[in-house]
Amino acid sequence: MNREINQYGLWFGMAAFCANGAFVVVQTLQLLRILTYPYDEILIYGTSLCIVVPFLLEMLALHHAAPERKRFWSHAALLFTVIYAVFVIANYVVQLATVIPATLRGNAGEIALLVQTPHSMFWDFDAIGYIAMGIATLLALPVFERRGIGRWVRIAFLANALVTPLIAFVYFYPEFSERLLLLAIPWVITAPASMLVLALWFKDRLEAQAPAQQAGASVP
């Protein structure tokens, strides 16, 4: 079962990393005005939505892989990952399934409350989600050893947690602008790096298990 958990952590971690990478590409193309409405928002919300479930399952695998004495922290990290998932899924599904189709039909006025614009309700949903993600990576730090691949996971998770105040500032500063959005650029490195390095942590555990299994298989 431990091997299966490590495999799941690796697979879902790589899926989350790839989805996050796709989001970064789409966000860059939007800022460069290469993508325009509605394709920019469809792709941004779509790639963002693709991050959520793999990352949630990666953190679930972490909780099950954590040593018993450290599961308080892995459980706490999982709870904040669930908060992230609930808020951002609610936002992205509403934008993709309701707001964008209504806007394309010319009915934007009827669903104005649902549109994610700076300091709107769903803007705040997005903010809560990504702040919760940062807290999750902070709370997970005690799970990892300060050596080997665990050290690199700690560095990546801490870096992502330290970016969280910048995320909060960008979302809640009274006057939003694209220049202000640039303050959150470190997140496009720290978030995918966290998902990737955690996936490599699971890979390292799988490789460590392989010699023991081979030795057991060779015993007559």
Image: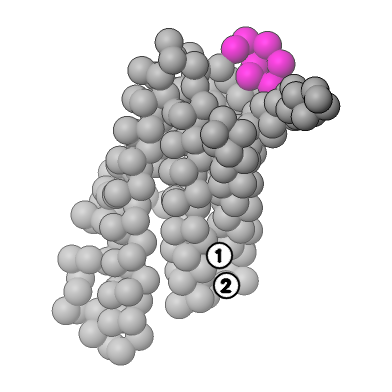
Where's residue 112, x and y in %?
20, 71
Secondary structure of residue under mark 2: loop
The reply to whether residue 191 is visible in this rendering is no
Callout 1: few (<14), some (14-19), or many (20+) C-alpha neighbours within 10 Å?
A: some
- Quadrant (top left/top right/bottom left/bottom right) for the N terminus: top right
Q: Which mark is residue 99?
A: none
Query: Is 101 on the left-hand or right-hand side of 144?
Result: left
Q: Is there CB contact under 8 Å for labels 2 and 1?
A: yes
Query: Is 111 on the left-hand or right-hand side of 211?
Result: left
At a point 36% along the width and 17% down the height, the residue shown is 72
Determine the image quadrant of residue 198: top right
Q: Nearer the viewer, residue 167 or 55?
A: 55
9 in relation to 65, above or below:
below
Secondary structure of residue under mark 1: helix
Where's residue 168, x and y in %?
36, 36
Magenta-drawn stretch contains 146? yes
Give the residue at the far bottom of this rendering.
105
In this figure, which residue is indicated by the disc labeled 2?
Answer: 35
Mark 2 or mark 1: which comes first in sequence?
1
Where's residue 115, x and y in %?
27, 66
In this figure, which residue is indicated by the disc labeled 1?
Answer: 30
* Real-space CA distance between mark 2 and mark 1, rounded to the nearest whole angstrom: 5 Å
- Magenta span of residues: 145-151
